[in-house]
Image (cartoon, rainbow, N blue to C red):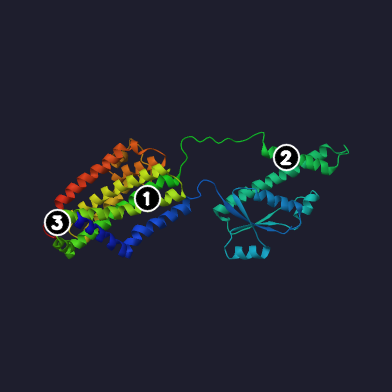
Amino acid sequence: MKNTLLVALREVRSYLVDKADLAFSLLLPIVTFALIYGAFGGQGLFHGTVSVVNEDTNGAYAQQLLDSIKKQDSLTVQMLTRADAEAKLNQASLNMVFFIPPDFSSKLNLGQPVAMTIMQRGNGGQDGQIVASIVGGVVSEFNHQFTVIDQVNQSLAGKNIPATRITVTTMQFLNRERQDPLVGIDEVSVGSKPNTVKDFLPGIITMYVLFSISISAAALVEERRKGTLERLLTTHLTVGGLFLGKFLANVFRGFIQTFILLVLSYAVFRIFTPLTFVESLLIALIFAIACSAIGLLIASLVRTQDSATWIGVFFTMTMTMLGGTFFTITKGTTLYTFSKLSINGYANDAFKTLINNGSISTLGVEIAVMVGVTVVGLILSRLTFKVLPQGK
């Protein structure tokens, strides 16, 4: 057993020294996680930046309009000078800028119409159009405020009520209406809301482990070709001990990737409870063990490194597609029937159950399938395991 562990440790050291292997196994999951976080970390609500040039710097109504825009949770206001705004538009570092004219407040005081100006490149981009729509809603509400005040002033004309008092009182009623509107909107979700991270993370985790199959299988075939396996037997190591050492090393290679992704997901996205996080690590370990057994079987059956790589990649892509990694497979379809042949489909289902606060106690079928694959894979790979390119 000691020699077996030494073989496993030797494999781990070689793995840590190999920069290409290390980059694939450690850095690539981190990069993938960064992409997931960048794409979906703030999923749900839109948030954009509105660039504004306020040329009515001392105008009360201009400031009031800016304050209304700043109150929008989905917007961040960026103040610019005209020169900066035009330069950024010309350099294509901005797609859209809103200009408040110098006479904005003075014209409103006189009851005269006034317009903001929007300068944009092309159509302003998708985000720019959304920002323009939100700002348009704020301006529309601003117009509504003046319309109501004007109508109240006309209705109370000749009543000897000061215009200032009418304006203040009307604004109080409008603010009350905004805080407690007579007509509101209640959102009712039918079914579960989509969560991209929860939907895709399990598939990404299992896909990385499956890719480790081709790497480990190709490496083992190359060691057999170079005679490295044969030389290891001169250290009083049995074939069985060598086989077990390789198996343990491959388990480590596959598990370290899932460990990184799960730890980052637990720390950043908060999609696990402490208990389901530990249970997810256990599922990841079982899946890595099963994949290691499959990798050994491939390495035992093929003769060349290229064959091992291509079979490993083909197996990975087939299992990934059948396992519903990137899309939902509808029950009752032919594809759903074939999906039962995919080992990572069972692993994906297990991870999704735990991510949605399920319990590992309900995953008997998924665990049994992965354990069964491990047992069958180990038996077949041990029976066909070769130290020399020809024969045992």
To which quarter of the image does residue 19 belong?
Answer: bottom left
Answer left or right for 217 relative to 389.
right
Q: Residues within 10 Å of mark 2 (few under 14, many from 20)?
A: some
Q: Earlier in the sequence, mark 1 or mark 2?
A: 2
Element on which disc 2 rests: helix
Q: Is residue 157 above or below residue 64?
A: above
Residue identifier under label 3: 238
- Front residue (pair 41, 357): 357
Element on which disc 3 rests: loop
Residue 383 visible in the picture: yes
Residue identifier under label 1: 204
Report if the CB atoms under discs 1 and 3 are less than 8 Å apart.
no
Q: Earlier in the sequence, mark 1 or mark 3?
A: 1
Quarter of the image where the C terminus is located: bottom left
- Front residue (pair 83, 275): 275
On residue 142, the disc is: none
x, y percent for residue 132:
62, 51
Mark 3 or 2: in front is 3
Answer left or right for 388 relative to 65.
left
Mark 1 to mark 2 CA distance (whole Å): 51 Å
- Front residue (pair 178, 255): 255
Q: Residue at x 64, y 62 (%)?
A: 85
Report if the CB atoms under discs 1 and 2 are less than 8 Å apart.
no
On residue 174, the disc is: 2
